Amino acid sequence: MIDHIAVQVADPAASAAFYDRVLAPLGGKRLFERGEGRVIGYGTSFPTFWIGPVTTGGQAREGHLAFSAPDRAAVRAFFAAAVDAGAEVLHEPRVWPEYHPAYYGAFVRDPDGNNVEAVCHVPEQP
């Protein structure tokens, strides 16, 4: 149901470096840039996730972003890329049965303090 989402970031270059790394294991990449890299769109075939500078005054506010992963290996790769990029670990990859029996996710903080998750909704494949 989501067409796209955008978040405000304090430092577009730092956030872009983070998302370049952590979205790659999920098949995401930079697809659009405007304003000398200040507004950047990520996706697989068209931009569905956007970052841009704070335009409303004050600081960027925390949000929760959950990116879909095709399998559990991609969740683990996302997590490894995030940790390698210096992200704060919120929750290591694991099953979250309180959401549903096959919910497998990992949670980190991006450079602006957003809670960023990669999630797979299918059981582990042998």
Image (cartoon, grey):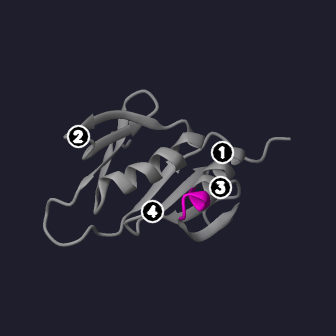
Foreground mark, 2 or 1, reads 2
Count neighbours of disc 2 (C-alpha within 10 A) and say few if under 14, some if 14 to 19, many if 20 or more.
Answer: few
Q: Which mark is residue 74?
A: 1
Q: Is residue 51 above or below residue 29?
A: below
Does the segment drawn in magenta span residue 60?
no
* Disc 4 to disc 3, C-alpha distance: 14 Å
Where does residue 38 sit, x and y in percent of width and height? 24, 47
Compare marks 3 and 1 and give the one earlier in the sequence: 1
Task: Identify the residue position indicated by label 3 in the image.
Answer: 80
Task: Identify the residue position indicated by label 4 in the image.
Answer: 110
Compare marks 4 and 2 and give the one earlier in the sequence: 2
What main secondary structure does the magenta stretch of the protein show?
helix
Q: Which mark is residue 89?
A: none
* Disc 1 to disc 4, C-alpha distance: 18 Å
Count neighbours of disc 3 (C-alpha within 10 A) and say few if under 14, some if 14 to 19, many if 20 or more.
Answer: some
Compare marks 2 and 3 and give the one earlier in the sequence: 2
User: Which quarter of the rendering shows the C terminus?
Assistant: top right
Amino acid on which the number 4 mark rests in the picture: Asp
The part of the chain drawn in magenta is 82-86
Task: Identify the residue position indicated by label 2 in the image.
Answer: 36
Amino acid on which the number 2 mark rests in the picture: Glu
Does residue 15 appear in this view? yes
Does the segment drawn in magenta span residue 83?
yes
Foreground mark, 4 or 2, reads 2
Foreground mark, 2 or 3, reads 2
For the residue pair 122 and 73, the one nearer the viewer reads as 73
Amino acid on which the number 1 mark rests in the picture: Ala
Q: Is residue 122 left or right of residue 7?
A: right
| Number of marks | 4
Does residue 96 appear in this view? no
